[in-house]
């Protein structure tokens, strides 16, 4: 994790970007926002603009068509920013990794701080990762 998130430890504003794929991870991402998992108790809120986000959550494999958009969105997230690759496709390209139009995981285009594998990963895994970010424990292996 890059930078000091001291002033953001009480809340995280999250921007979600779907770079392609089957949308299974998107369904689980949305499920994490429901009252059952209640991400808002951690201060996590979904924001409509990357300019307001602390965390960028990427789902799906990065395609040639989505790579430039992903870079642009990443540049719009203010520092210090955290990138979470949610799902095997966002981590490594997954089942789409050998497709002609797929570049691979999000780390092929931008630095990823936290990887959450799974096809699709459970909402609990996103809850765990975001809670570790709020507590300042996640460092993405850096």
Image: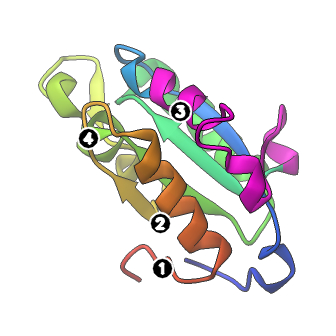
Can you tell which mark lies on residue 113?
2
Residue visible at 25% across and 32% down in the picture: 119
Q: Please tell me whether mark 2 or mark 3 is closer to you in this view.
A: 3
Viewport quadrant of the N terminus: bottom right
Rounded to the nearest angstrom, the CA distance separating label 4 from label 3 is 12 Å
Dot 3 or dot 1, earlier in sequence: 3
Q: Is residue 80 magenta?
A: no
Tag 1, which secondary structure?
loop
Q: Please tell me whether mark 2 or mark 4 is closer to you in this view.
A: 4
Tag 2, which secondary structure?
loop
Q: Are marks 2 and 1 in contact (CB under 8 Å)?
A: yes
Residue visible at 75% across and 80% down in the picture: 5
Rounded to the nearest angstrom, the CA distance separating label 2 from label 1 is 6 Å
Q: Is residue 46 visible?
A: yes
- Furthest-front residue in this view: 36
Question: Within 10 Å of the Cα at label 2, are there few (<14), some (14-19), or many (20+) other Cα atoms?
Answer: some
Residue visible at 38% across and 20% down in the picture: 24
Magenta-colored span:
26-52
Q: Nearer the viewer, residue 35 or 65?
A: 35
Dot 2 or dot 3, earlier in sequence: 3
In the rendered structure, the answer to whether residue 55 lies left or right of residue 91 reads right
* Residue 126 screen position, x and y as percent: 49, 50
Tag 4, which secondary structure?
loop
* Residue 93 screen position, x and y as percent: 25, 35
The residue singled out by tag 3 in the image is 29
Q: Are marks 4 and 3 in contact (CB under 8 Å)?
A: no
Q: Is residue 35 magenta?
A: yes
Dot 2 or dot 1, earlier in sequence: 2
């Amino acid at each position: 994790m890059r930078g000091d998130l001291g002033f953001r430890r009480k809340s995280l504003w999250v921007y979600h970007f779907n770079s392609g794929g089957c949308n299974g991870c998107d369904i689980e991402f949305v499920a994490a926002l429901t009252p059952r998992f209640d991400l808002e108790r951690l201060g996590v809120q979904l924001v409509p603009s990357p300019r307001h986000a602390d965390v960028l959550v990427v789902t799906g494999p990065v395609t040639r068509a989505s790579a430039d958009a992903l870079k642009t969105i990443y540049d719009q997230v203010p520092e210090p920013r955290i990138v979470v690759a949610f799902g095997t496709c966002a981590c490594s390209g997954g089942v789409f990794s050998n497709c002609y139009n797929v570049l691979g995981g999000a780390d092929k285009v931008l630095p990823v701080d936290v990887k959450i594998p799974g096809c699709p990963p459970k909402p609990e895994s996103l809850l765990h990762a975001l809670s570790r970010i709020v507590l300042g424990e996640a460092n993405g292996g850096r």
